[in-house]
Image (cartoon, rainbow, N blue to C red):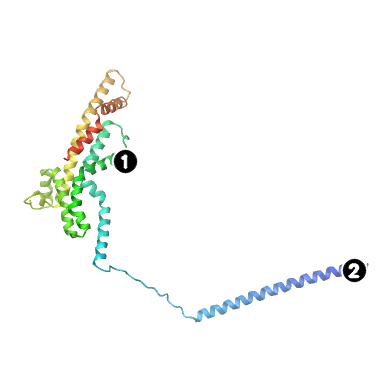
């Protein structure tokens, strides 16, 4: 009995100690939370007492330090403008228009719609354009671009000189009928010499002449392949094979004919020599 009473007392004591410990912990936590709240309120009151200060912002604009830096800035602007207009300049002021149209007609005449693909045709047209335009580009570089880069001439003079070889190239390919048409459309006076024609007249006249020449060359390319299609279709009709597409039979013969006569060599040679 004495041992049991001692155990009961010991258990009650342990329970009492645990309860006291929990109460103390809870009281300490509440007091800490109260202190934090009070501290936060005091901080807020102090912050509210301080007047807000607007942030100081400074804006600096650095300009040109002299004529040379301004000239460099104008050169950069001019270069960016030329790069943005490069596709239009390539298509309208060079031989690229005629070459790419003729190559497109050739692919359609053969009947191989995806061989060669567009990337190859455009790449070949681009390199052929460089071959055709190399004398003109070299003259433009020597007479206008290099003196301008060396600060020997101004921008206005360089722009006037760069037009001379380019205009001479376009006038060598343009038709008088097209020039007369755009002189009438723009209400421009007829100059004393073709070199005095404005670019507003020369450029569209050149593009119109190039389109007509390209379509004429495309028509000539279509004739031999069209004859092969007609012969194959007639043979199939006479044999009663009406359900067989003639294009399926004529395509190998057209490719064979084009390879035997070395068609790519002849077409490229004709395109380049037509500008010389």
Q: Quadrant of residue 177?
A: top left
Whichever of callouts 1 and 2 sits on the residue coming sooner in the sequence is 2
Vertical placement of residue 240 versus 116, above or below: above
x and y percent of residue 93 in the render? 20, 47
Q: Quadrant of residue 3?
A: bottom right
At 20% from the left edge and 48% from the top edge, which residue is drawn? 138
Which disc, if any, is residue 119? Answer: 1
Crowding at dot 1, Cα within 10 Å, few <14 / some 14-19 / many 20+, comes out as few
At 24% from the left edge and 33% from the top edge, which residue is drawn? 265
Q: Nearer the viewer, residue 79 or 114?
A: 79
Task: Give the quadrant of the N terminus.
Answer: bottom right
Q: Which residue is mark 2?
A: 5
**Is disc 1 placed on a helix, strand or loop?**
helix
Task: Give the quadrant of the C terminus.
Answer: top left
Q: Is residue 155 left or right of residue 49?
A: left
x and y percent of residue 247 in the render? 30, 27
At 79% from the left edge and 71% from the top edge, which residue is drawn? 17
At 18% from the left edge and 54% from the top edge, which residue is drawn? 144
Vertical placement of residue 147 versus 170, above or below: below
**Is disc 2 placed on a helix, strand or loop?**
helix
Q: Is residue 206 left or right of residue 236?
A: left
Q: Is residue 42 left or right of residue 68?
A: right
Q: CA distance from mark 1 to mark 2?
A: 103 Å
């Amino acid at each position: 009995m004495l041992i049991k009473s001692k155990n009961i007392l010991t258990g009650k004591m342990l329970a009492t100690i645990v309860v006291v410990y929990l109460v103390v912990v809870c009281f300490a936590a509440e007091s800490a939370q109260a202190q934090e709240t009070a501290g936060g309120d005091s901080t807020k009151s102090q912050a509210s007492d301080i007047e807000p200060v607007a942030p100081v912002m400074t804006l600096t604009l650095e300009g040109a330090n002299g004529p040379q830096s301004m000239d460099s800035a104008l050169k950069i602007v001019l270069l960016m403008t030329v790069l943005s207009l490069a596709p239009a300049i390539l298509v309208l002021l060079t031989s690229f228009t005629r070459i790419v149209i003729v190559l497109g007609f050739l692919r359609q005449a053969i009947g191989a719609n995806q061989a060669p693909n567009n990337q190859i045709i455009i790449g070949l047209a681009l390199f052929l354009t460089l071959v055709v335009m190399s004398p003109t580009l070299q003259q433009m570089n020597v007479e206008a671009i290099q003196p301008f880069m060396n600060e020997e001439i101004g921008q206005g003079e360089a722009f006037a000189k760069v037009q001379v070889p380019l205009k001479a190239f376009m006038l060598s390919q343009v038709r008088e009928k097209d020039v007369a048409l755009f002189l009438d459309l723009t209400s421009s006076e007829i100059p004393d010499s073709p070199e005095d024609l404005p670019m507003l007249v020369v450029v569209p006249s050149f593009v119109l002449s190039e389109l007509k020449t390209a379509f004429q060359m495309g028509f000539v390319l279509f004739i031999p392949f069209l004859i092969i299609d007609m012969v194959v279709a007639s043979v199939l009709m006479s044999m009663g094979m009406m359900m067989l597409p003639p294009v399926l039979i004529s395509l190998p013969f057209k490719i064979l004919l084009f390879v035997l006569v070395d068609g790519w060599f002849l077409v490229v040679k004709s395109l380049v020599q037509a500008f010389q």
